Amino acid sequence: MTHLNCLVPRPFHRILLFCSIPCAVLLAGGCATPAPTASSAPAPPLLLSRDGTVRYRLPAGWFDVTADTVAADRTIWLIRADYAGTLTVRQVHMRAVDRADLEGEGLLQVAKLTAALETSSKPGILAREPDHSQINGREAVSYDVEYSGSGDRTRTVLLAGDGQVYEITALVNGNAPPGAGKEIFAALQSFLSALRW
């Protein structure tokens, strides 16, 4: 203040002090527009499945190879950027199944059948029995399989939509880094919550 005494007349010291406090507060708080948070960032666009019946969002850190696959039964096929896991969606083809059956115990019976086929075709064991849940107000049935040879793990969710049954499977590669399984199954949940029919 001694240096200011030489340059600024005495009555203006209080005015300078009064004006400098709000300026200091503004500078400390930041005047720039805050960066967008994850919740305010726009959601990724909805993509359309190969069969044209399901809309989905690509999880962050994953890429879509649906158009590049020759496997015609894969409606959607996503791969994690580090190749530690995949998400696939395919339609379960069955002989005439009444929609009413699917809304009752029918979906559970289909899950038991697909789980039995999965564990018999590969050296796998059923790690979690098929059980009911709800996804976006729709009935779902899910189960887990572990494969002894490769160390791979899968979580499969069956959903009925528009008279069809879809099997959504998250695969965790046996060579995935620690913690990847939890992240991949979380990506599955996020993917399922964004599905639109």
Image (cartoon, rainbow, N blue to C red):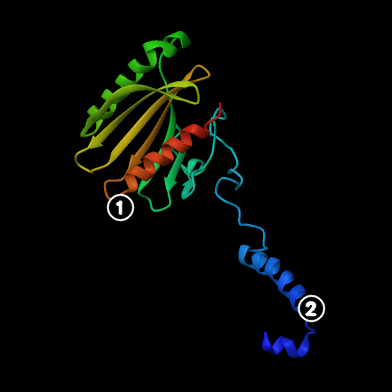
Please give the label number shown on residue 12. Answer: 2
Q: Amino acid at mark 1?
A: Pro
Q: State the residue in front, 196 or 15.
A: 15
Circle 1 packing at 10 Å, graded few (<14), some (14-19), many (20+), is few
Q: State the residue in front, 101 or 17.
A: 17
Left or right of 122 in this view: 61 = right
Q: Quadrant of residue 103?
A: top left
Q: Secondary structure at mark 2?
A: helix
Image quadrant where one finds the N terminus: bottom right
- Give the image location of residue 50, x and y in percent: 53, 34
Image quadrant where one finds the C terminus: top right
Residue located beneath label 1 in the image: 177
Single out the mark in the foreground, 2 or 1.
2
Residue displayed at 67% across by 64% down: 26
Furthest toward the front, the residue is 11
Q: State the residue in front, 161 or 133.
A: 133
